[in-house]
Amino acid sequence: MTALRWESRPQLHAPVLIAAFDGWTDAGGAATGAASYLSEHWKARRFADIDADDFYDFTQRRPQVLLNADLSREIVWPVNHFLTASTGDGRDVIVMIGTEPHLRWKAFSECVTAVATHLQVEAVFTLGAMLGQVVHTRPAPLRVSTANQQLADRLGLHRPQYQGPTGIVGVLQDAFAKVEIPAGSLMVQVPHYIPRTPSPKATLALVERVCDLLGTTVPTASLQQAAASYEREVNEAVAADDEIAGYVTELERRVDDADPAEGRNNLGQLPSGDALIAQLEEYLREQGDSP
């Protein structure tokens, strides 16, 4: 397993691993944003990484060239870092911040489970964010699920309901089950009509739920301010287009009228991006046909 590179081997007590990946399940940068926010607050230190060379098609995700202050050039490859920290109440935590690989997902997963097994991780939580029929003026819907019955009973979590294409977080859930490490998934939804806009509101939802699961807290004032600014800016953009404004108003009505329990149960059944776009186009056509 030469792709896994250890810088040090920390001595930890019953750590929890939190993992997030840039890619398909990182809408609005919410998952990696939450992992980065937590690792920065906890002053996490890197102790291992996974070499990018075996796992990426660099014609799809090209490395970046950066110029340093002395004008020397540096190549920046896709990163998969493991960091360790302690929360304010003394719990040991491992944070993995990575990039969804293109190739050899089984071998990649073995690198991740090797770290968890070596450091005797007691539980894993993967973070994700997907586009959904949700609205930016309401709290970001978030669902926590696990296929592990003991973890579900201990933390009061849902069992998985989603069926369909999966990302690396889904593959890792299966890999951790095979090495008998309980794993849970946190999945937040981001408004599909602003897919490329960073979503601090979704990041905030993930940060708060992770802290709830770990029994700890972190200051979130900066995220709350960013979420408020995000809502104001999107409001201004939506207000400039009468058709989109009408669509958002309709989404708000659906969210406010929905039964909360039904909404939580349906969160795992995410529509495809094509389906969401088709729904938006259908709505706009209907508005165009109105007298």
Image: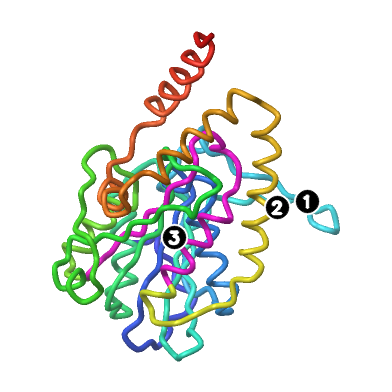
Which residue sits at x=60%, y=31%? Answer: 245
User: How many numbered circles are shown?
Assistant: 3
| Most foreground residue, 261 or 114 | 261
| Element at label 2 | strand
- Pick out the residue farthest to the right: 70
Local crowd at mark 1 within 10 Å, few (<14), some, or many (≥20)?
Answer: few
Instruction: Find residue 180 and report its image quarter.
Output: bottom left
Q: Which residue is mark 3?
A: 50
Marks 3 and 1 close (CB-CB < 8 Å): no
Q: At 53% across and 35% down in the image, what residue appears?
A: 249
In this rendering, the answer to whether 181 lies above or below 170 is: below
Q: Are marks 1 and 2 in contact (CB under 8 Å)?
A: yes
> Where does the C terminus fall, quadrant-wise?
top right
Name the residue located 46 percent from the left edge and 36 percent from the top edge: 251
Q: Is residue 165 left or right of residue 251?
A: left
Q: Nearer the viewer, residue 248 or 267?
A: 248
Question: Which stretch is magenta?
Answer: 182-210
Q: Reading the chain from its start, which is encountered first: label 3 or label 1?
A: 3
Q: In front here: 131 or 107? A: 131
Residue assigned mark 1: 67
- The amino acid pointed to by label 2 is Glu
Residue 127: give x, y in percent of width and height: 40, 59
Q: Earlier in the sequence, mark 2 or mark 3?
A: 3
Left or right, 64 with respect to 162, comes to right
Q: Determine if the magenta segment contains residue 188.
A: yes
The alpha-carbon separation of the residues under discs 3 and 1 comes to 24 Å
In the image, what residue occupies the spot 31% across and 69% down?
Answer: 124
Secondary structure beneath label 1: strand
**From what the image shows, is residue 162 above or below residue 18?**
above
Q: Which residue is mark 2?
A: 74
Q: Is-magenta flag for residue 134?
A: no
